[in-house]
């Protein structure tokens, strides 16, 4: 092994140690059928839960498939073998439930009476106002 390779390996190990201390990591994961949520127990003692319908690859999964969740690596991700789906813990904690394209397609799809009223109001005015230069 060359000296450069040894230095690179040492630097990578150092980055890994830093990531384990700074990034959220999962200690355990399960699908809670009663709540309809994937529940992630973090190494810092916190618990994070999310509805699987929000996550890319889990939208149409059965409860039996959702229950087959596994931890990846040192708790850096979640994996569903039967669904060929993987999600990162740091990404989930940041509200990213899929790839950039998936998130763009699903952004703004939530509906509410306020959102519907605003759309009707904008439509009555001829649509969205033009941006001034």
Image (cartoon, rainbow, N blue to C red):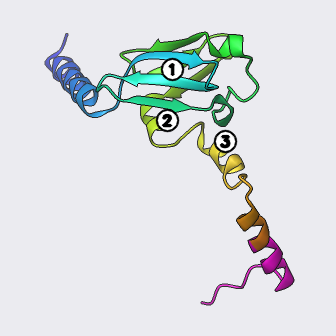
Point out the frontmost of discs 2 and 3.
Answer: 2
Q: Earlier in the sequence, mark 1 or mark 3?
A: 1
> Which of the numbered marks, if any, corresponds to residue 8?
none
Point out the frontmost of discs 1 and 3.
Answer: 1
Segment tinted magenta in the rendering: 118-133
The residue shown at (73%, 21%) is 61
Disc 1 is placed on an element classified as strand
Question: Residue at label 2?
Answer: 92
Question: Residue at label 1?
Answer: 78
- Residue 29's spot in the image, x, y percent? 48, 17
Badge 3: how crowded within 10 Å, few (<14), some, or many (20+)?
Answer: few
Disc 2 is placed on an element classified as helix
Q: Are marks 1 and 2 in contact (CB under 8 Å)?
A: yes
9, 92: nearer the viewer: 92
| 107 in relation to 127, above or below | above
The residue shown at (49%, 35%) is 92
Residue 76 seen in the figure = no
Question: Residue at label 3?
Answer: 102
32, 1: nearer the viewer: 32
Q: Earlier in the sequence, mark 1 or mark 2?
A: 1
Separation of marks 1 and 3 at Cα, in angstroms: 18 Å
Separation of marks 2 and 3 at Cα, in angstroms: 14 Å
Disc 3 is placed on an element classified as helix
- Residue 47's spot in the image, x, y percent? 41, 28
The residue shown at (20%, 10%) is 1
| 43 in relation to 127, above or below | above
Q: Where does the C terminus fall, quadrant-wise? A: bottom right
Q: Viewed as shown, does residue 8 lie left or right of 80?
A: left
- Residue 48's spot in the image, x, y percent? 45, 31
Q: Is residue 16 magenta?
A: no
Q: Quadrant of residue 16?
A: top left
């Amino acid at each position: 092994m060359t000296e450069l390779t040894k230095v690179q390996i040492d630097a990578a190990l150092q980055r890994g140690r830093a990531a384990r201390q700074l990034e959220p990591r999962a200690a355990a994961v399960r699908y809670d059928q009663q709540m309809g949520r994937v529940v992630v127990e973090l190494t810092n003692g916190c618990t994070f839960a999310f509805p699987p319908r929000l996550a890319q690859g889990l939208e149409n999964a059965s409860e039996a498939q959702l229950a087959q969740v596994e931890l990846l690596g040192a708790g850096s991700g979640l994996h569903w073998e039967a669904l060929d789906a993987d999600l990162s813990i740091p990404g989930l904690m940041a509200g990213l439930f899929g790839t950039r394209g998936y998130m763009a397609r699903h952004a703004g799809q939530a509906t509410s009476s306020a959102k519907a009223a605003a759309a009707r109001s904008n439509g009555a005015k001829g649509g969205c106002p033009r941006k001034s230069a």
